[in-house]
Image (cartoon, coloured by chain):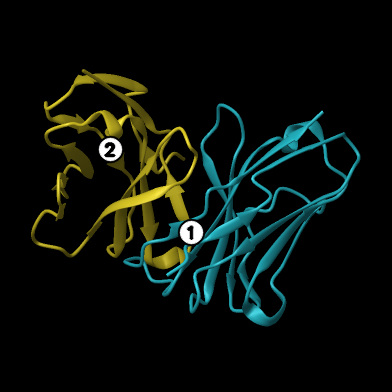
Chain colours: A yellow, B cyan
Amino acid sequence: AQKITQTQPGMFVQEKEAVTLDCTYDTSDPSYGLFWYKQPSSGEMIFLIYQGSYDQQNATEGRYSLNFQKARKSANLVISASQLGDSAMYFCAMREGSSWGKLQFGAGTQVVVTP
Amino acid sequence: EAGVTQFPSHSVIEKGQTVTLRCDPISGHDNLYWYRRVMGKEIKFLLHFVKESKQDESGMPNNRFLAERTGGTYSTLKVQPAELEDSGVYFCASSQGSSYNSPLHFGNGTRLTVT
């Protein structure tokens, strides 16, 4: 069964606008971590932000914030003030406490920032 | 601090040949992972080393794939003999811890093309 679902295959956003990337997850494990990664056209996978299942507050890292709604099992990434360099593929991923190291990925969302 | 490095960045081989991919994790990271993304599909877990031991190799597709991490430093992933369906991008990642709240740091990947 699919554990991470990203329903937006692609999005266009104008420079300086905010964009929200959707991510829902499925787990019965009480301990889990949610991650967002960015993959620009150059290919590297860049870690952006982390949210733990026990965290009370939404995670923020610079222009990135994670809208964590535990009851809905959603962990949407918000990028504020988009820049041209934000154009990339964005992956949502989850690690469950019961499965050691395994990081499970969603299908990704391709973001294109336009001037 | 050097990041995760992978070699080669690209490899083109013929069906039936052998290819060996190498990964150097971040210094001090005991946990090393291999993932791959086959064209059009999601990023999938292959295996996880803790130091030189295989913690989880449930994602290895078949016995044509052999991963090693002698001495607990760098790792190699050998595909022998390569098949057309092995084409894709192979990512290596490392982390300090293996708990659910420890982010994985990825290399740039090796793009493997089997013709």
* Residue shown at 32% from the left, 29% from the top: A87
Q: Residue A69 versus residue B74: which sits nearer the camera? A: B74
Q: Quadrant of residue A88?
A: top left
The kind of residue tagged 1 is: Lys
Q: Quadrant of residue A90?
A: top left
The kind of residue tagged 2 is: Cys
Element type at mark 1: loop
Element type at mark 2: loop
Residue at mark 1: A102
* Residue shown at 24% from the left, 32% from the top: A21
> Could you say where residue A64 lies in the image, as x and y percent from the top left?
18, 45
> Could you say where residue A78 lies in the image, as x and y percent from the top left?
16, 38
Q: Residue A86 versus residue A78: which sits nearer the camera? A: A86
Q: Chain of mark 1?
A: A
Eyeballing the image, is B97 above or below A77?
A: below
Residue at mark 2: A23
Q: Chain of mark 2?
A: A
Eyeballing the image, is B23 above or below A83?
A: below
Distance of label 2 from label 1 (alpha carbons) = 18 Å
> Could you say where residue A46 lies in the image, as x and y percent from the top left?
38, 49
Residue reaching furthest to the left: A57
Eyeballing the image, is A13 above or below B46?
A: above
> Could you say where residue A41 lies in the image, as x and y percent from the top left?
45, 32
